[in-house]
Amino acid sequence: MKPKFAYIYLSFKGTLPLKGYWIYWNMPFLVLAIIDYFLARRAITLESNFFQIINLLIIWPFLAISVKRLHDLDKSGWWILINLVPVIGSAIFWLILSLMPGAKVINDYYEEKI
């Protein structure tokens, strides 16, 4: 059996249902926002080295989770490139991943739902 952390955050295979996306991606961002709020009160801003390191560490998990969510929607992982469209692309991408229900049938990307 695959370790759950490695499967979720490091692997590009399989699918991730809507609930899993909210739990494994949006909730950690909420925690980071709360941490940022308290650090901002201590004059530590998002431009600090701490947050630059955090940003570098979340790139791979962002890609892995987003691709799994796209697979659940029966879309190719290449759809992630819509983020290259300034502002509108990122907003549309977030709405698609956060609100659209997954495919009702087992698709080509299905391995194991989390």
Image (cartoon, helix red, strand yellow):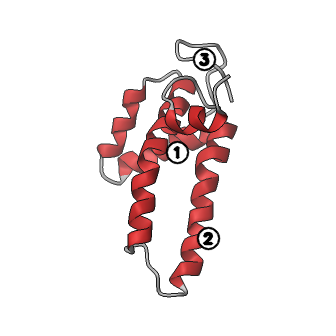
Which residue does the numbered mark 2 point to in the structure image?
34
**Label 1, residues with CA under 10 Å away: few <14, some 14-19, many ≥20:** few
Task: Using the image, determine if residue 50 lies above or below residue 111.
Answer: below
Residue type at numbered disc 1: Leu
Q: Residue at x 37, y 28 (%)?
A: 78
Which numbered disc flags the more N-terminal residue, 3 or 2? 2
Residue 33 placement, left or right of 104: left
Q: Which residue is mark 1?
A: 95
Q: Residue at x 37, y 73 (%)?
A: 47
Image quarter of residue 29: bottom right
- Rendered position, 106 above or below 27: above
Q: Position of residue 58 (x, y in %)?
A: 46, 51
Q: Which residue is mark 3?
A: 111
Instruction: Give residue 50's position: percent from left, percent from top.
Output: 44, 69
Three-letter amino acid code at disc 3? Glu
Please tell me in which quadrant of the rendered image residue 18 appears.
top right
Marks 1/3: CA–CA distance: 24 Å
User: Is residue 43 depicted above or below 60 in this figure?
Assistant: below
- Element at label 1: helix
